[in-house]
Structure formats: structure tokens, C-alpha cells
Image: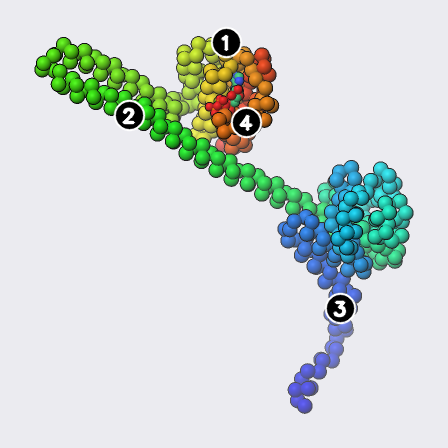
Amino acid sequence: MGSKRAREPLPSRGIDAPARVPTPMATSSLGRVTRIFSALAQSQKPGTLLGRVAAELGRLLEQPLALVALSAPAHYVLAAATGVTISRRLQLRHTPLDPGRIPTLAAAATRNGPVRIETAELPYRWREALGPLTVLVPIWSRDRRGGFFLLPSQGTEREELLLIAEALGYQTGIALENAELLRRVTQKEQALRSMVRSQMEAQEEERQRVAGDIHDGLTQQLVGIWYRVHACERLIEAEPAAAREELAVIKARIDESLVEARNALYNLRPSTLDDLGLLPALHSLCARFQEESGVHARLVAETLQELPDHYEIALYRIVQEALNNARKHAQASNLSVLVRKRGERLTVEIRDDGRGFNPRSQRRYRNAAHFGVAGMKERAKLLGGTLAVRSSPGHGTSIRVIIPLPLEVRALA
Ligand SMILES: Nc1ncnc2c1ncn2[C@@H]1O[C@H](COP(=O)(O)OP(=O)(O)OP(=O)(O)O)[C@@H](O)[C@H]1O
Ligand SMILES: [Mg+2]
């Protein structure tokens, strides 16, 4: 008996008591709005997100179905639907809405809020799904109209519910934009990861190549020298003249080995880059190129502040590969390396007047044997820049790299 009394509701006290008890209508509308906002707040795939919002919007406006058409961009195409069978969904997806042929739809696209239109002008499939009258709720993204929610209408939707629907249209537009931004960021992240992976692979290949060079070059030469020294040891008493001849050969071999060792070291890490900076290093690269290839080479450069190490090495490697290519493929007479600073961007261009090639067909037939251009592009990309190859048979080649200068260098400018 005592416990029964305890469960009895408290008598209402004070004039504000009834206001604190929400009506069933307000509870369900608010509940739906809250659910829609939480659906929008969760980052989901656009299709799932639109489906959930459409379902909640249908419940809010008490309609059994809701369709979502997104701009694609000349037509509106079904992007999600709720309350329709799969086969109808497929039919609708294959029947785009063309605002050019549906004046009421084109007019609705210029309005801010939800509008009711007769479906007489819509394609048969849409009419069949929606009935004679439909409410269009615009989905906005900034200034661009993204599309519409389309729901059947009795023509009696309450004004406040339509206002809520309008706000949801805006929020849906923002959520779609966020989903698109997320997609792009994820795509960039993946691209960056694969670039880092291929850089690491390239590094590994480079190490193997260097190891191979040392094995086949320097090591073999040292072995050769060792045998000659050994022979010399035997000759020195019995045939001093022959021993002296052998010593002269040994000295020549040691000189050759030193040159090879220096070249290998220079290719691994050019000392001029560390000691003097990018421009002097490019200058000496051009001088070596001219000396070795006989192609007249010049560097035209504006003064440049010191760049972070990884910028200098990447730009150096790009120019080095462009010069290697010119030497191997171009048969040029002249080559120039131009370094220019324009505002916050640095441009490095390598031009030759050689036989040129068709970069398109090169791209098509690209295979594992040609790493050079792809590697140059990746290096430019890693610095947030671009690399363009301009060439055509008989008209020389130009490789142009444009990179944004790092913030600390911009601040000094
Ligand atoms: N300056 C140039 N003049 C003429 N053809 C060029 C020039 N630069 C590149 N090419 C063409 O583009 C192709 C691709 O160059 P890439 O540097 O990618 O590969 P590769 O030089 O053949 O090989 P790798 O650089 O991997 O040793 C070359 O094989 C050549 O046909
Ligand atoms: Mg190459």
C-alpha cells in the first residue's frame, strides 16, 4: 500500500509545471531533428548519409518515401532514396531530371526554401513514385545548389516543419561538402603514402646500384692492384726494372680508382651542395656536363636565399636527371638551366635544343626501365610543386619545375 502511494505522480505545482512536459508531437519532431543532426554530424559515405537524412525527413513530414536528387551537374540524378523498392530505385536512377525540360524544377532551383510543385512535368517514373504533388527541399552547398529532397505532398505540410526541412537542406549541403573534403584529404594522404613508399623503394634500388658499382668497379680494381703488388714483390730483387714498370702501372691504376671513388661519392652526395649551396652546385653540375658531353651549357639564375636541405637536394637531383637525359637522348648543341623566383614560387627550367620527343607516347609506353621523368615528378610533388615536360620531335625539350617556396624563406624575402 505504502509503495503504491510512492509511485503516484507528483501533483502539478506552480504555473510553469505544464510547460515542462513536452507534447507528443514536439517530442517526436524534436527527436527526429536531433536524429537527423546526429546523422549529419557523423562522417559517413555521402550515399549512407543522404539515405539516413531522407528517411528522417520522410518521418518528419509524415511521408512514406523520400528521394534525393543531386546535381550531376547538368541534370539531377537520384543519389539516395528511402521507402522505395530496389527496382524502382534503379528505374529512377536511370531517369535523370533535366531542369532544362522541367520549368517548375528550374524555378524551384532559384528559390531558397522548400517549394511544392505539381509533378505533371516530371518524368513518368518520378510522378509514379511521388504522386501528383511533391515538396522539394533544396540541398545547398555554399552558393552552389547541390540538389533536392523530393517527398510526396498532401499540400498541408505545416510551416514550422518546412522551416526545419529548409535548415536540414542547408546542413545536408555542408555535410556533403565535408564528406567531399574528407575524401580529397584521404586521397591525398594515400597518394603521399604511396609516394613515400616509392621513394623508399627508389632509395633501396639506388643503394643496390651503388653496392653493385662498388663491387664491380672499385673492389675489382683493388683486387687487380693487389695481384700486381704481389707480382712486384717477387720481381723487386730479381728484375728491378720490370718491378719499376709494374709500379708505374700500379700508380696509374690507383689514380683511376681514386677518380672512380670520387665520382661515386660526388653522385651520392655532391660536396658543393653542402659546402656552397644550390646555385654553385648547379653551376658546377653544368660545367661538368659541358666538359663531358661537349654540349654548351649555361646557368642563368637569380640570387636565391638558402633553401632547406631537402629542397636543395631535390632540385639538384631533378636538374641532374634532366642533364643526364639531355646527354643520353637529346643530341643537343645548347642547354640552359634557368632559375627564377616569382613571388612565393621558385621556377627551375632546363631547356635543350635537341631532337625532342613526344611526352604523351612516352607516358603511354612508360615501363620499369624508365624511372627518370617519373622520379623528377615525384620529387617536385613531394615539395608541393609541379613538373611539366614540354617537348615535341625536332623542337627540343623543356622541363619546368615550379615549387612554392617554404614559409621560412618567404619570410626572409
Ligand atoms: N631531353 C630529352 N631529349 C629527348 N628525349 C628525351 C629527353 N628527356 C627524356 N627523353 C625521352 O623520355 C624518355 C624517358 O626518360 P626517363 O628519364 O624517364 O627514362 P630514361 O632516361 O630512358 O631511363 P632512366 O632515366 O630510368 O635511366 C627517354 O627514354 C627519352 O626517350
Ligand atoms: Mg633518364
Q: Earlier in the sequence, mark 3 or mark 4?
A: 3
Q: Which residue is mark 2?
A: 219
With respect to residue 125, does 400 lie above or below?
A: above
User: Which quarter of the picture shows residue 190?
Assistant: top right
Q: Is residue 60 above or below residue 182?
A: below
Which residue in the protein does label 1 denote?
333
Label 2–label 1 contact, CB within 8 A: no
> Quick one: SS at disc 3?
loop
Residue at position x 21%, y 12% from top? Answer: 248
Please tell me whether mark 2 or mark 1 is closer to you in this view: 2
For this view, does 201 lie left or right of residue 171?
Answer: left
Label 1 Cα crowd, 10 Å radius (few <14 / some 14-19 / many 20+): some
Looking at the image, tell me whether mark 3 or mark 2 is earlier in sequence order.
Answer: 3
Q: Position of residue 399 (x, y in %)?
A: 54, 20
- In primary-sequence order, the first of circles 2 and 1 is 2
The alpha-carbon separation of the residues under discs 3 and 4 comes to 69 Å
Please name whichever residue, 142 or 43, is drawn nearer the observer in this view of the structure: 43
Residue indicated by mark 4: 366
Residue 196 vs 281, above or below: the answer is: below
Instruction: Give the residue type at disc 2.
Output: Thr
Report crowding for label 2: few under 14, some 14 to 19, many 20 or more residues within 10 A (C-alpha).
some
* Label 4 packing within 10 angstroms: few (<14), some (14-19), many (20+): few
| Residue located at (77% from left, 55% from top) | 85
- Horizontal and vertical percent for residue 289? 43, 15
User: Could you tell me which secondary element the residue under label 1 belongs to?
Assistant: loop
